[in-house]
Image (cartoon, rainbow, N blue to C red):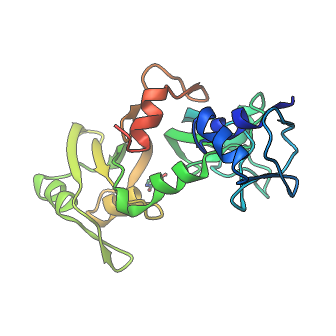
Amino acid sequence: MAERLQKVMAEAGIASRRKSEVLITSGHVKVNGKTVTTLGVKVEPSDHVEVDGVPLNAEKLVYYLFYKPRGVVTTVHDEKGRKTVLDFFEDVPERIYPVGRLDYDTSGLLIMTNDGALANRLTHPKYEVKKTYLAKVEGVPTNADLKQLRLGVEIDGRKTAPAKSNLLDSDHKKNNALVQLTIHEGHNHQVKKMLAAVGHPVTKLKRERYGVLDLQSLQPGEYRKLKPIEISKLKGER
Ligand code: URA
Protein backbone atom coordinates (compact mmCIF):
# COMPACT_ATOMS: atom_id res chain seq x y z
CA MET A 1 0.00 0.00 0.00
CA ALA A 2 1.31 3.44 -0.94
CA GLU A 3 2.06 5.73 2.01
CA ARG A 4 3.26 9.28 2.33
CA LEU A 5 7.02 9.55 2.20
CA GLN A 6 7.32 11.39 5.52
CA LYS A 7 5.19 8.74 7.23
CA VAL A 8 7.35 5.94 5.88
CA MET A 9 10.47 7.79 7.03
CA ALA A 10 9.06 8.36 10.49
CA GLU A 11 8.07 4.71 10.82
CA ALA A 12 11.56 3.65 9.79
CA GLY A 13 12.86 5.67 12.74
CA ILE A 14 14.59 8.38 10.65
CA ALA A 15 12.95 11.36 12.38
CA SER A 16 9.53 12.63 13.38
CA ARG A 17 7.09 13.28 10.53
CA ARG A 18 7.69 17.03 10.84
CA LYS A 19 11.46 16.65 10.68
CA SER A 20 11.12 14.15 7.84
CA GLU A 21 9.20 16.81 5.89
CA VAL A 22 12.08 19.22 6.42
CA LEU A 23 14.55 16.57 5.25
CA ILE A 24 12.45 16.10 2.10
CA THR A 25 12.03 19.79 1.25
CA SER A 26 15.70 20.48 1.87
CA GLY A 27 16.74 17.85 -0.69
CA HIS A 28 18.09 15.04 1.50
CA VAL A 29 15.74 12.34 0.24
CA LYS A 30 15.77 10.28 -2.95
CA VAL A 31 13.06 7.94 -4.19
CA ASN A 32 14.22 5.39 -6.78
CA GLY A 33 17.34 7.46 -7.36
CA LYS A 34 15.58 10.81 -7.86
CA THR A 35 15.68 13.61 -5.31
CA VAL A 36 12.22 14.51 -4.06
CA THR A 37 11.72 18.00 -2.61
CA THR A 38 7.94 18.32 -2.63
CA LEU A 39 5.61 16.99 0.01
CA GLY A 40 2.76 14.66 -0.79
CA VAL A 41 4.75 12.02 -2.63
CA LYS A 42 3.57 8.51 -1.84
CA VAL A 43 5.80 5.46 -1.89
CA GLU A 44 5.15 1.73 -2.16
CA PRO A 45 7.04 -0.79 0.00
CA SER A 46 8.93 -1.78 -3.17
CA ASP A 47 10.20 1.79 -3.75
CA HIS A 48 13.81 2.47 -2.86
CA VAL A 49 14.12 5.40 -0.47
CA GLU A 50 17.45 6.95 0.54
CA VAL A 51 18.22 9.63 3.08
CA ASP A 52 21.59 11.26 2.44
CA GLY A 53 22.51 8.24 0.36
CA VAL A 54 21.62 5.73 3.07
CA PRO A 55 18.87 3.29 2.06
CA LEU A 56 15.92 3.27 4.36
CA ASN A 57 14.34 0.14 5.55
CA ALA A 58 10.93 0.94 4.11
CA GLU A 59 9.43 -1.81 6.16
CA LYS A 60 7.68 -0.89 9.35
CA LEU A 61 9.83 -1.87 12.30
CA VAL A 62 8.24 -4.65 14.31
CA TYR A 63 9.28 -6.31 17.55
CA TYR A 64 8.12 -9.63 18.98
CA LEU A 65 8.86 -11.59 22.10
CA PHE A 66 8.79 -15.29 21.25
CA TYR A 67 8.79 -18.33 23.50
CA LYS A 68 10.93 -20.64 21.41
CA PRO A 69 10.09 -24.28 21.98
CA ARG A 70 12.74 -27.01 22.09
CA GLY A 71 13.39 -28.71 18.75
CA VAL A 72 13.39 -25.54 16.65
CA VAL A 73 16.39 -23.93 14.94
CA THR A 74 17.15 -20.25 15.49
CA THR A 75 17.73 -19.47 11.81
CA VAL A 76 15.45 -18.28 9.06
CA HIS A 77 16.21 -21.32 6.91
CA ASP A 78 17.47 -24.79 7.75
CA GLU A 79 19.19 -26.95 5.17
CA LYS A 80 18.14 -30.10 6.98
CA GLY A 81 14.50 -29.04 6.76
CA ARG A 82 14.03 -28.73 10.50
CA LYS A 83 11.43 -26.41 11.96
CA THR A 84 12.74 -22.82 12.23
CA VAL A 85 11.65 -19.93 14.42
CA LEU A 86 10.19 -18.25 11.33
CA ASP A 87 7.68 -21.09 10.90
CA PHE A 88 5.85 -19.59 13.89
CA PHE A 89 5.54 -16.18 12.22
CA GLU A 90 3.84 -17.06 8.94
CA ASP A 91 1.25 -14.32 9.47
CA VAL A 92 3.88 -11.60 9.93
CA PRO A 93 4.64 -9.98 6.54
CA GLU A 94 7.80 -8.13 7.64
CA ARG A 95 11.17 -9.81 7.16
CA ILE A 96 11.95 -10.48 10.78
CA TYR A 97 14.82 -12.50 12.17
CA PRO A 98 15.98 -13.65 15.60
CA VAL A 99 18.22 -11.51 17.82
CA GLY A 100 21.02 -13.82 18.89
CA ARG A 101 20.62 -17.55 19.18
CA LEU A 102 19.25 -20.33 21.26
CA ASP A 103 20.38 -23.92 20.67
CA TYR A 104 18.06 -26.37 18.91
CA ASP A 105 17.33 -28.12 22.21
CA THR A 106 17.04 -24.91 24.28
CA SER A 107 13.68 -23.27 24.87
CA GLY A 108 12.85 -19.77 26.01
CA LEU A 109 12.81 -16.10 25.30
CA LEU A 110 13.90 -14.86 21.91
CA ILE A 111 13.34 -11.44 20.37
CA MET A 112 12.31 -11.37 16.73
CA THR A 113 12.54 -8.09 14.82
CA ASN A 114 13.49 -6.42 11.54
CA ASP A 115 15.25 -3.57 13.38
CA GLY A 116 18.90 -4.21 12.56
CA ALA A 117 20.13 -1.35 14.73
CA LEU A 118 18.45 -2.79 17.80
CA ALA A 119 19.59 -6.33 16.98
CA ASN A 120 23.19 -5.08 16.75
CA ARG A 121 22.92 -3.20 19.99
CA LEU A 122 21.46 -6.14 21.91
CA THR A 123 24.09 -8.59 20.70
CA HIS A 124 27.05 -6.23 21.15
CA PRO A 125 29.10 -7.26 24.21
CA LYS A 126 29.57 -3.59 25.16
CA TYR A 127 25.94 -3.23 26.24
CA GLU A 128 26.05 -6.24 28.57
CA VAL A 129 22.40 -7.26 28.21
CA LYS A 130 21.61 -9.67 31.05
CA LYS A 131 20.20 -13.07 30.15
CA THR A 132 18.86 -15.46 32.76
CA TYR A 133 18.75 -19.21 32.17
CA LEU A 134 17.21 -22.08 34.05
CA ALA A 135 19.29 -25.22 33.69
CA LYS A 136 18.54 -28.74 34.78
CA VAL A 137 21.89 -30.33 35.48
CA GLU A 138 23.38 -33.69 36.34
CA GLY A 139 24.49 -33.92 39.97
CA VAL A 140 23.99 -31.32 42.67
CA PRO A 141 26.34 -28.33 42.46
CA THR A 142 28.15 -27.45 45.70
CA ASN A 143 28.52 -23.92 47.01
CA ALA A 144 32.06 -23.96 45.66
CA ASP A 145 30.73 -24.83 42.16
CA LEU A 146 28.21 -21.99 42.33
CA LYS A 147 30.90 -19.59 43.50
CA GLN A 148 33.14 -20.67 40.65
CA LEU A 149 30.35 -19.90 38.16
CA ARG A 150 29.97 -16.44 39.72
CA LEU A 151 33.67 -15.68 39.56
CA GLY A 152 34.12 -17.06 36.05
CA VAL A 153 35.17 -20.39 34.59
CA GLU A 154 37.47 -21.14 31.70
CA ILE A 155 35.75 -22.14 28.48
CA ASP A 156 37.49 -22.33 25.11
CA GLY A 157 40.63 -20.86 26.68
CA ARG A 158 38.85 -17.77 27.99
CA LYS A 159 37.51 -16.88 31.40
CA THR A 160 33.83 -15.99 31.54
CA ALA A 161 32.76 -12.66 33.01
CA PRO A 162 31.27 -12.56 36.50
CA ALA A 163 27.82 -14.16 36.54
CA LYS A 164 25.02 -14.78 39.00
CA SER A 165 24.23 -18.32 40.01
CA ASN A 166 21.62 -19.81 42.31
CA LEU A 167 20.65 -23.33 43.20
CA LEU A 168 16.85 -23.36 42.92
CA ASP A 169 16.20 -27.02 43.60
CA SER A 170 18.11 -30.24 44.13
CA ASP A 171 17.27 -33.94 44.22
CA HIS A 172 20.01 -36.05 45.74
CA LYS A 173 18.11 -39.28 45.05
CA LYS A 174 17.76 -38.57 41.35
CA ASN A 175 21.14 -36.86 41.39
CA ASN A 176 20.06 -33.71 39.57
CA ALA A 177 19.42 -30.04 40.27
CA LEU A 178 17.96 -26.82 38.92
CA VAL A 179 20.38 -23.93 38.55
CA GLN A 180 19.59 -20.33 37.63
CA LEU A 181 22.42 -18.59 35.84
CA THR A 182 22.53 -14.95 34.71
CA ILE A 183 25.19 -13.96 32.21
CA HIS A 184 25.72 -10.96 29.95
CA GLU A 185 28.02 -12.52 27.39
CA GLY A 186 26.82 -14.66 24.53
CA HIS A 187 29.46 -17.16 23.52
CA ASN A 188 28.40 -20.29 21.68
CA HIS A 189 26.77 -22.79 24.06
CA GLN A 190 28.02 -20.65 26.91
CA VAL A 191 25.68 -21.86 29.65
CA LYS A 192 26.15 -25.53 28.78
CA LYS A 193 29.92 -25.08 28.69
CA MET A 194 30.03 -23.17 31.99
CA LEU A 195 28.04 -25.81 33.82
CA ALA A 196 29.99 -28.65 32.22
CA ALA A 197 33.19 -26.88 33.32
CA VAL A 198 32.14 -27.20 36.96
CA GLY A 199 31.20 -30.86 36.49
CA HIS A 200 27.43 -30.53 36.00
CA PRO A 201 26.36 -31.13 32.40
CA VAL A 202 23.08 -29.53 31.36
CA THR A 203 20.22 -31.87 30.48
CA LYS A 204 17.59 -29.19 29.83
CA LEU A 205 17.92 -25.46 29.25
CA LYS A 206 15.48 -22.57 29.13
CA ARG A 207 16.06 -18.82 28.83
CA GLU A 208 13.75 -17.10 31.27
CA ARG A 209 14.76 -13.46 30.95
CA TYR A 210 16.37 -11.17 28.42
CA GLY A 211 17.15 -7.64 29.64
CA VAL A 212 13.91 -6.20 31.00
CA LEU A 213 11.79 -8.93 29.41
CA ASP A 214 10.45 -12.20 30.76
CA LEU A 215 8.16 -14.89 29.39
CA GLN A 216 5.19 -13.97 31.61
CA SER A 217 2.19 -16.05 30.60
CA LEU A 218 3.42 -17.17 27.18
CA GLN A 219 3.48 -20.87 26.33
CA PRO A 220 6.13 -22.49 24.11
CA GLY A 221 5.46 -21.54 20.47
CA GLU A 222 3.53 -18.38 21.38
CA TYR A 223 4.60 -14.81 20.79
CA ARG A 224 3.45 -11.29 21.54
CA LYS A 225 4.31 -7.81 20.30
CA LEU A 226 6.70 -5.84 22.47
CA LYS A 227 5.19 -2.77 24.16
CA PRO A 228 6.59 0.66 23.19
CA ILE A 229 8.02 1.07 26.71
CA GLU A 230 9.80 -2.29 26.42
CA ILE A 231 11.24 -1.30 23.03
CA SER A 232 12.58 1.99 24.35
CA LYS A 233 14.10 0.25 27.36
CA LEU A 234 15.87 -2.24 25.08
CA LYS A 235 17.12 0.68 23.00
CA GLY A 236 18.56 2.21 26.17
CA GLU A 237 16.32 5.28 25.89
CA ARG A 238 14.90 4.91 29.42
N1 URA B 1 23.85 -21.13 26.35
C1 URA B 1 23.76 -22.36 25.82
O1 URA B 1 24.56 -23.22 26.12
N2 URA B 1 22.77 -22.61 24.96
C2 URA B 1 21.86 -21.68 24.60
O2 URA B 1 20.97 -21.98 23.80
C3 URA B 1 21.96 -20.40 25.16
C4 URA B 1 22.97 -20.15 26.04
Q: Is residue 134 above or below residue 122?
A: above
Left or right of 134 in this view: 166: left
Percent position of residue 95, x then y: 74, 43
Between 72 and 21, the residue placed more toward the observer is: 21
Residue at the top extreme of this rendering:
217
Left or right of 63 in this view: 181: left
Q: Quadrant of residue 198?
A: bottom left
Residue 232 visible, this angle: yes
Percent position of residue 67, x then y: 54, 33
Residue 72 visible, this angle: no
For the N terminus, give its image quadrant.
top right
Residue at the spot x=38%, y=41% of the render?
Answer: 237
Between 27 and 193, the residue placed more toward the observer is: 27
Residue at the spot x=84%, y=36% of the render?
Answer: 41
Percent position of residue 182, x then y: 29, 48
Quadrant holding ligand 1? bottom left
Left or right of 91 in this view: 207: left
User: How many numbered marks are there?
Assistant: 0
For the C terminus, give its image quadrant.
top left
Left or right of 224 in this view: 114: right
Residue at the bottom extreme of this rendering:
157
Residue at the spot x=52%, y=41% of the render?
Answer: 110
Percent position of residue 209, x then y: 38, 38
Residue at the left extreme of this rendering:
143
